[in-house]
Amino acid sequence: MKTTEQTEVYKSADLALVAVLLLFIPDSLEVCDRTNPHKVLFAFKKSDELDELVAKYWKRELKVEPQAFFNELKLAKVRIYAHE
């Protein structure tokens, strides 16, 4: 059974998807979950906009500016390797 907290957050370890979400809705990032030492999960606040972006991502319907995407990819990696 999912708790309320689990249903309000979308988690992903897919770096390309994370970069897209950070590019389109940067304020939706809630936390980088590092509880698993082998995988970082990015947790985003659930919204209709997020659900639509994720669906478009998997359907390959998104168009992004390449440099902006690459910059977000680099920033996501910085968040992965940052020590808190």
Image (cartoon, rainbow, N blue to C red):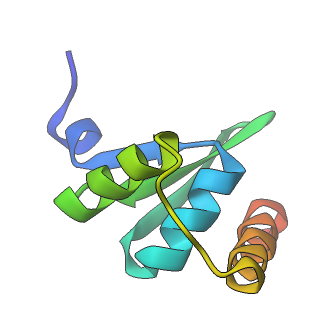
Where residue 65 sits in the image (x, y, percent)?
Answer: 65, 81
Q: Quadrant of residue 50?
A: bottom left
Q: Tell how many labels.
A: 0
Q: Residue at x 21, y 59 (%)?
A: 47
Residue lying at the far top of the rendered structure? 1
Is residue 84 among the parts visible in the rendering? no
Q: Quadrant of residue 30?
A: bottom left
Q: On the rendered image, what quadrant is the N terminus found in?
A: top left
Q: Residue at x 38, y 57 (%)?
A: 53
Left or right, 52 with reference to 11: left
Q: On the rendered image, what quadrant is the C terminus found in?
A: bottom right
Q: Residue at x 15, y 39 (%)?
A: 4
Left or right, 28 with reference to 59: left
Q: Foreground residue, 28 or 33?
A: 28
Q: Residue at x 45, y 76 (%)?
A: 24
Decide: is 49 above or below 25.
above
